[in-house]
Image (cartoon, grey):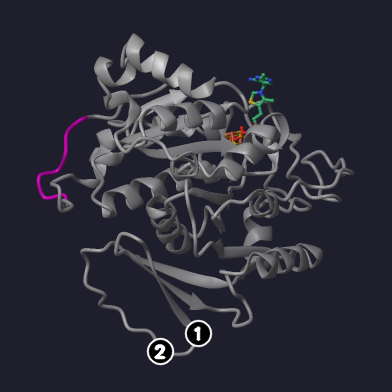
């Protein structure tokens, strides 16, 4: 993979977060993506979110599949762990890593081809298992890396750059995530940093499978008239259901909203999500309501964005499996190999 390392020089007056890092400490290599690619804006939002959350970079693991989107973990969090896996297989590798070491913060980055075509099965199962992760789908409706074939998220009737019409029904990834049991489901747009950064922060804080579908225009192959994943189309059809603000537990809440249409959602660790309702009929704690709204918006050609679903009773894979409190990779030989006597007792208990 080609890359350009960034110069290490920092301006001495760059603002620092509470653990002494600048925003630069959360950056990666210089991006080799096309200028204007939506994926670069998503990398910038991730950098901003981690910087603002004061997270130690060595406590983060970024995993991805294959595609322009899956290259992006090279362009953010250069001091974190990373694994560029196989096309469509990020979820199973991430699940394994998470089972071995639950103490890391997991970010899975994928594309629409990676998640909705070759990796559809993996995507579905990682959601239903509730793996504690933030799954970021950089959704451009095409296979960008292999030069712009329609992906499975391309809308029926949308047009390719050379005019061919897509005749297949689209896989709607947010509906699928909801159906499969994701406990945090949101959609955003790479061109809306104001919405995207707090959504990323809330997804990172969520304990369970958090799915974030980000419409991310491909300027090389899918940004023309007739595309439903272009900058112009999304700006014109973006239907925002709510605006989210996120406060980590230690921060005083300083912003005041007018009383109407604001919901406060306290997190288990003391964090607070404030949801400002824009569509007052929208209830993000009701899965059926969310599913209906998403389907109705799709019928009208609207792109519904915001926090679409947040389960009040979210749990993750480790609580489903009732695993040991200590992460497996921290257990010593004595815990992992308790000896022949213990094995004999276990076997006796099964006879
Ligand atoms: C097993 C396998 N099949 C096919 C490919 C070829 N391939 C590479 S990237 C890609 C699609 C990428 O599309 P997407 O996930 O949407 O990412 P984007 O480039 O659009 O960000 C394909 C088909 C591959 N690398 N491996
Ligand atoms: S081909 Fe498309 S997705 Fe890939 S870097 Fe260029 S604009 Fe981005
Ligand atoms: Mg794509």
Residue bearing mark 1: 261
Q: Residue 311 appears at what percent x and percent y?
A: 53, 62
Instruction: From the top left corner, tell me how far across and down residue 196 is, in percent.
Output: 46, 57
Please state the horizontal and vertical placement of residue 287, each as a whole percent of the image.
64, 64
The answer to which of 16 and 256 lies nearer the viewer is 256
Specify the label residue 258 is tagged with: 2
Residue visible at 57% across and 69% down? Answer: 284
The reply to whether dot 2 and dot 1 touch (C-beta < 8 Å) is yes
SS class of the residue under badge 2?
A: loop
Residue at 52 percent of width and 78 percent of height = 277
Viewer-nearest residue: 195 or 322: 322
Range drawn in magenta: 8-14
Ligand 1 resides in the quarter of the picture at top right
Judge whether 257 appears above or below 221 on screen.
below
Q: Would you say residue 13 sits in the magenta stretch?
A: yes
Residue at left 69%, top 53%? 179
Camera sees residue 221: no
Q: Residues within 10 Å of mark 2 (few under 14, many from 20)?
A: few
Count the marks: how many?
Answer: 2
The C terminus - image quarter: top right
Q: Position of residue 326 (x, y in %)?
A: 29, 34
Residue 76 vs 263, above or below: the answer is: above
Name the foreground residue: 209 vs 342. Answer: 342
């Amino acid at each position: 993979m080609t890359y350009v390392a960034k110069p290490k020089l920092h301006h001495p007056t760059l603002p620092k977060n509470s653990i002494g890092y600048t925003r630069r400490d959360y950056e990666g290599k210089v991006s080799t993506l096309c200028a204007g690619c939506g994926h670069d804006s998503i990398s910038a939002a991730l950098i901003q979110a981690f910087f603002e959350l004061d997270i130690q970079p060595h406590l983060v693991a970024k995993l991805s599949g294959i595609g322009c989107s899956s290259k992006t973990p090279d362009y953010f969090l250069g001091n974190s762990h990373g694994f560029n896996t196989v096309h469509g297989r990020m979820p199973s590798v991430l699940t394994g890593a998470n089972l071995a070491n639950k103490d890391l913060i997991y970010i899975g980055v994928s594309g629409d081809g990676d998640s909705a075509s070759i990796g559809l099965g993996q995507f579905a199962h990682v959601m239903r298992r509730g793996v504690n992760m933030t799954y970021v789908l950089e959704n451009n409706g095409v296979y960008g890396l292999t030069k712009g074939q329609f992906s499975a998220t391309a809308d029926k009737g949308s047009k390719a750059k050379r005019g061919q019409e897509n005749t297949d029904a689209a896989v709607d990834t947010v509906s699928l995530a909801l159906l499969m049991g994701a406990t945090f489901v949101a959609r955003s747009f790479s061109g809306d940093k104001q919405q995207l950064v707090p959504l990323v922060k809330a997804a990172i804080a969520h304990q369970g499978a958090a799915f974030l579908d980000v419409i991310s225009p491909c300027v090389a192959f899918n940004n023309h008239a007739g595309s439903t994943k272009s900058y112009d189309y999304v700006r014109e059809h973006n239907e925002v259901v709510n605006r989210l603000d996120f406060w980590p537990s230690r921060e005083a809440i300083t912003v005041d909203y007018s009383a109407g249409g604001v919901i406060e959602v306290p997190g288990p660790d003391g964090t607070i999500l404030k949801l400002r309702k824009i569509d007052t009929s929208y209830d993000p704690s009701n899965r059926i309501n969310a599913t209906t709204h998403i389907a109705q918006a799709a019928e009208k050609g609207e792109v519904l964005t915001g926090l679409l679903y947040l389960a009040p009773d979210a749990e993750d894979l480790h609580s489903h499996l009732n695993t040991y409190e200590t992460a497996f990779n921290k257990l010593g030989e004595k815990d992992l190999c308790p000896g022949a006597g213990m094995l004999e007792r276990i076997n006796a208990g099964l006879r």
